[in-house]
Amino acid sequence: MVMPDMQSSAPKMSARGVNVFYGDKQAIDNVSIDVDLDHVTAFIGPSGCGKSTFLRTLNRMNDTVASARVEGEITLDGEDIYSSGMDVVQLRARVGMVFQKPNPFPKSIYENIAYGPRIHGLAGNKADLDQVVEKSLRRAGLWEEVKDRLNESGTALSGGQQQRLCIARAIAVDPEVILMDEPCSALDPIATAKIEELILELRGNYAIVIVTHNMQQAARVSQRTAFFHLGKLVEQGPTTEIFTNPREERTKDYITGRYG
Amino acid sequence: MSGETALDQSGLGVPAERAPTDWRGDAMRRRIARRYASERRFRLLGMAAVLASAGFLAFLLISMMGNGLRGFTRTEVAVPIDFPRSVAMIDPAVLQTNPEQALANANLPAVLEQATTQAFGVSDTQLLSPNAVLALRDAIIRDPAILDQKVTVNLPASTGIDVAMKSEGNGTDEALASRLDDTGVISTAFNLGFLTGSDGTDPTMVGIWGALKGSLITMVITLALSFPIGVFAALYLEEYAPRNRWTDLIEVSINNLAAVPSIIFGLLGLAIFLNVMHLPRSAPLVGGMTLALMTMPVIVIAGRNAIKAVPPSIRDAALGIGASPVQVVFHHVLPLALPGILTGTIIGMARALGETAPLLMIGMRAFVSQPPGGFTDPATVLPVQIFLWSDEVGRGFIEKTSAAIIVLLAFLLTMNSIAIYLRNKFEKKW
Ligand SMILES: Nc1ncnc2c1ncn2[C@@H]1O[C@H](COP(=O)(O)OP(=O)(O)OP(=O)(O)O)[C@@H](O)[C@H]1O
Ligand SMILES: [Mg+2]
């Protein structure tokens, strides 16, 4: 399954000794982890343990929370993303994010996808843009369903379609890393399966980090898994190992469903 | 232990098994009936409230229309004039090249005097409006051939006759009016002069255009200043400003500003714009600036609420694909907040349009007989004009006041319709 040599190349993103505080309250405690380019990394752990918080430090979305404070070092291709030289807008284009709740823009389906490429100047003309829109929707497995109504509202789609629209929107700007925060939590099994398929297909082109409460899903889509508990990274390793032979008792209890 | 028993004895103890709810019992039926009744009551109350306000509005409109529509008409007298035998001194050569000048020197008032005395036995000043000379002049310019004939010209009646015909004038005018009416020389026509003229001393001569134009220019300045400043202030406070004691202070100040009585803004305008900045008195520029001071806080408050109502998930979505804060604001937040901002703008502008007090302070109550040509010309505005006319003693001004109110309401309606059209356009839900 996961070959040891796959970890030989330098990690795409790496975090060292990261602490996150909301005001005085510490939400993440000394977390160090690597995210590799050709891997899907799953973050698992009980509710409130800080998975979303940590995920949001990876593209500095925590900057928008006034009370949040981040310590430690996080690098993208070896460059510190919290350094003053890093342009946060460009960082977020390179490290895309899919949120827990589908949040399409209240604009047309076409505009939803075209917005990112347009503001980053990724498409020269209308034809290019059309192509980017089609390609992104195809990759997100939504094209067939919406190709005849690209001018309709993105918010009029079903929940699962909206989530795939958000994924298409994220990949339209061609990020290097995609962060997904429980992308399937509101979806039915069929839509979930579609998104898992999509993740498997995207794997290799993008470094993908996915937060999930669904152990089967983590086992199905990820190659590496990290288990968080009470703001600490308890254990990380190849997914097969975490699921078949966890080193920590807490990990074992969690994945066997003994607590959550 | 004893506590528990006490509870059990008083019947408050939790029963071992919950009795099944009786969904069809009498008590339940009564509860449902009560619920329906309260719902009906609520609907009736709501309908009564809507009917009451619609009734007030209808009453206002009908009474205004009843009084005011007459202000748009004028009474005319058919005066027979025998030009060849009149005292008119018109140089045909000059009439060809420069009719205005020829007629200015033609002694037309004497012609009218002669004509009215001959035909009706009264002087022209009693029978005809001072405007009649102008009307006669226009008639001659339109068709110079009448100078060689004996013709009948419809000329605007004096205020006394006008009032006597429309409502109740004084004794002599009433008698004269009814005598003339019997001979069939009196008619009613649309008073175009009311829509094109400005303030004057004789009610038959006044027009609303000067005040309307003054209001228009003032509103343009108010909007041009208060809308951008208000929107940018709201955006800055909501999207950029840190939350601290200073922004709290600013918020409280702005809320208070919106509640400050308007006359105080007038004093402020007087003190700053006129006394310190030495801008021209009575000018729409200063009026617009003063009203902008008053309108801006309303727009800021409405704007902040509208911006606050934009879901944070939209901001996250935009930031998440690498939109800069400015792009988030202008591409997503502002378009979604615009309908709310426009609602606030409508309210603020409607209030500004109806304001009199602050404009009195900066001298916009002057008698202005010429429509303003620009931002700095002396001008008056509709509500001030209404106020001035309602203060006049002449009876003829009563209907002019009502007519001016109709014009003001029409202006207000037009302004609001445009704003609501724009709002609906932006409100297009996706
Ligand atoms: N904006 C915030 N302000 C203050 N505290 C916060 C904020 N967001 C999260 N927290 C706290 O940080 C801790 C971690 O929250 P986080 O959302 O990261 O959990 P999570 O692991 O994603 O949980 P879930 O699986 O339920 O989504 C929680 O205790 C939460 O209360
Ligand atoms: Mg979460």
Image (cartoon, coloured by chain):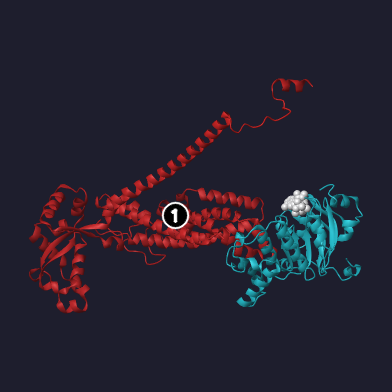
Q: Nearer the viewer, residue A92 or A85?
A: A92
| In the image, residue A95 above or below residue A68 | below
Task: Tell me the quarter of the image containing the N terminus of chain A.
Answer: bottom right
Q: Is residue A16 visible?
A: no
Amino acid type for the residue under numbered disc 1:
Ala
Q: Which chain is red?
A: B
Q: Is residue A160 visible?
A: yes
**Residue drawn at 74 percent across, 28 percent down:** B16
Relative to B182, is A156 on the left or the right?
right
Task: Give the residue at mark 1.
Answer: B350
| Disc 1: residue Cβ within 8 A of ligand 1's nearest atom | no
> Which residue occupies the extreme front position in the image?
B24
Relative to A108, is A79 on the left or the right?
right
Tell me residue B217's x, y (percent): 41, 63
Q: Nearer the viewer, residue B404 or A115?
A: A115
Chain under callout 1 = B
Q: Nearer the viewer, residue A231 or B256?
A: A231
Q: Nearer the viewer, residue B96 or A17?
A: A17
Element under disc 1: helix
Relative to B211, is A221 on the left or the right?
right
Residue B19, by quadrant, is top right
Tell me residue B51's x, y (percent): 41, 44
- Colour seen for chain A: cyan
Relative to B26, is B113 on the left or the right?
left
Q: Residues within 10 Å of mark 1 (few under 14, many from 20)?
A: some
Residue B307, by quadrant, is bottom right
